[in-house]
Image (cartoon, rainbow, N blue to C red):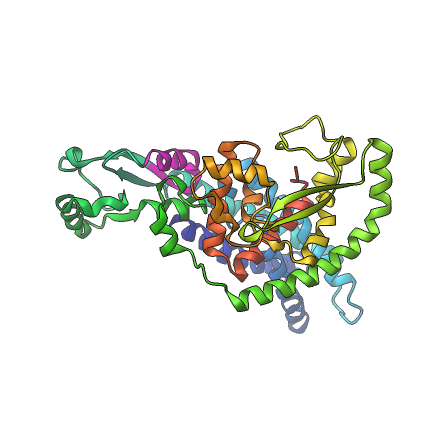
């Protein structure tokens, strides 16, 4: 898929460009006359730093196709990442008493050179992605069941795909395909052996074929909800308990909850005072939520809205949110009391967001397979929370697509990705 191409066209070149920037910085700063042992010291020290820098690039989304959507977002993310990297390098060099190398002016030169090289390369990748690497695809269906997929492709043109047209039984015989073309196929192709045979003959032309659900899932990293059924769950979701994974995850939850609970205790006097001084009502927001397998529990949060708990969704710029509450939500400090829930095992660090019982019952009646999200523990953060904030029926349906994708692909590396990106969201004030 195109995402793999984008990933490796950025990750490996970024690593090489970091070392090239180091070499150029040595030439500029020392006019190429740095002794070999000192040069080795520079490369050794910066190798450790570069590993952290690449991790920062990953957290900032610079290895994802979405970062190439707009020039402004690409430049902003790279500037932000390099600013963080500069701080990391300072901490590394200036807080190690046994490290002889302390490149003050050299570090500034290296950062500037690295930024210029990386910016030029990322802009070049975006240019080729937009003008040279776009793959034309055709959508074949019997009953126009791929309309949602077409809309998703059009909304994510930066991923490098463009719909050339729709095919059906009548238009297929007259269609002409190039070697670079791709065809997205439906699940029910087996019901028409003649059409399947026609596509089989096209394989020798080098035409690429994609299953529509897999294509959608890899493109957007969410499940094609309108095109799945009970069989999809049987084939794609592991309903058995992953004992080792759950054990490690619970141990991590306990460790994080202890650290978080200490932060909560430290924050409590200040937060409680600010909440009480700026709006009437309790300090804590306590509300019943639905957990794993439908179990009910009470969730704890700092109150960020005027009045007590409500039975409605929070909207964008909700007038009930107080000034202090806006800060608490943006910084995610309002979530800190949930470390109590994390410690008690009501929730996990990563998982679907827990909802109110009456909202769950309402959505179960309106959204197919909504109850499947309760297969796992709800989370303090999650894949859906990073991608959408649901405040309506339509947004809840999209959110379920992300939740089901997480349930299907849940594992240590995916959890780590979500945690790292959550940290990035916190520091960039993307809370709501």
Q: Position of residue 199 (x, y in %)?
A: 18, 46
Count of residue discs: 0
Q: Is residue 22 magenta?
A: no
Q: Residue at x 72, y 31 (%)?
A: 321
User: Looking at the image, can residue 70 be seen?
Assistant: no
The residue range painted magenta reads 146-162
Q: Is residue 209 above or below residue 414?
A: above
**Residue 233 left/right relative to 376:** left
Q: Is residue 19 above or below residue 389?
A: below
User: Looking at the image, can residue 287 be seen?
Assistant: yes
Q: Position of residue 23 (x, y in %)?
A: 60, 61
Q: Position of residue 5 (x, y in %)?
A: 41, 52
Q: Is residue 144 above or below residue 108?
A: above
Q: What secondary structure characterizes most of the magenta part?
A: helix
Q: Considering depth in this image, is 225 or 129 the residue closer to the camera?
A: 225
Q: Considering depth in this image, is 359 or 196 the residue closer to the camera?
A: 359
Q: Considering depth in this image, is 257 or 29 the residue closer to the camera?
A: 257
Instruction: Name the outermost residue toward the bottom.
Output: 37
The quadrant of the rendering that contains the C terminus is: top right
Q: Residue at x 17, y 52 (%)?
A: 204
The quadrant in which residue 329 appears is: top right
The quadrant in which residue 36 appears is: bottom right
Q: Is residue 223 above or below residue 146?
A: below
Q: Position of residue 172 (x, y in %)?
A: 17, 37
């Amino acid at each position: 898929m195109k995402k793999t191409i984008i990933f490796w066209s950025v990750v490996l070149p970024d690593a090489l460009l970091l070392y090239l920037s180091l070499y150029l910085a040595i030439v500029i700063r020392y006019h190429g006359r740095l002794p070999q042992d000192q040069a080795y010291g520079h490369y050794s020290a910066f190798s450790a730093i570069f590993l952290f820098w690449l991790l920062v690039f990953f957290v900032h989304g610079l290895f994802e196709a979405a970062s190439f959507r707009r020039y402004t977002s690409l430049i902003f993310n790279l500037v932000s990442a390099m600013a963080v990297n500069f701080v990391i390098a300072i901490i590394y060099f200036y807080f190690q008493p046994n490290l002889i190398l302390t490149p003050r002016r050299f570090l500034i030169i290296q950062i500037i050179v690295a930024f210029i090289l990386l910016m030029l390369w990322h802009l070049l990748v975006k240019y080729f992605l937009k003008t040279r690497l776009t793959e034309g695809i055709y959508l074949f269906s019997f009953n126009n069941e791929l309309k949602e997929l077409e809309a998703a492709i059009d909304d994510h043109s930066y991923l490098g795909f463009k719909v050339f047209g729709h095919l059906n039984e009548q238009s297929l015989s007259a269609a002409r395909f190039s070697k670079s073309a791709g065809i997205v196929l439906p699940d029910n192709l087996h019901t028409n052996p003649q059409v399947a045979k026609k596509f089989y003959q096209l394989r020798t032309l080098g035409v690429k074929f994609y299953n529509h659900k897999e294509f959608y899932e890899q493109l957007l990293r969410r499940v094609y909800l309108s095109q799945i059924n009970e069989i999809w769950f049987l084939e794609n979701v592991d309903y058995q308990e992953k004992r080792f994974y759950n054990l490690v995850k619970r141990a991590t939850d306990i460790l994080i909850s202890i650290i978080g609970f200490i932060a909560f205790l430290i924050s409590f006097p200040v937060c409680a005072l600010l909440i009480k001084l700026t709006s009437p009502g309790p300090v804590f927001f306590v509300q019943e939520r639905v957990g794993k397998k439908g179990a009910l529990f009470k969730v704890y949060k700092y109150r960020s809205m005027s009045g007590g708990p409500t039975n409605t969704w929070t909207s964008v710029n909700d007038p009930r949110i107080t000034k202090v509450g806006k800060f608490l939500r943006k910084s995610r400090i309002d979530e800190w009391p949930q470390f109590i829930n994390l410690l008690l095992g009501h929730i996990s660090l990563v998982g679907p967001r827990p909802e109110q019982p009456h909202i769950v019952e309402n959505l179960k009646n309106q959204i197919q397979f909504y109850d499947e999200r309760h297969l796992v523990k709800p989370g303090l953060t999650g894949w859906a929370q990073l991608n959408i904030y649901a405040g309506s029926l339509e947004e809840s349906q999209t959110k379920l697509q992300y939740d089901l994708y997480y349930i299907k692909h849940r594992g240590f590396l995916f959890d780590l990705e979500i945690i790292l990106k959550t940290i990035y969201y916190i520091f960039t004030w993307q809370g709501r």
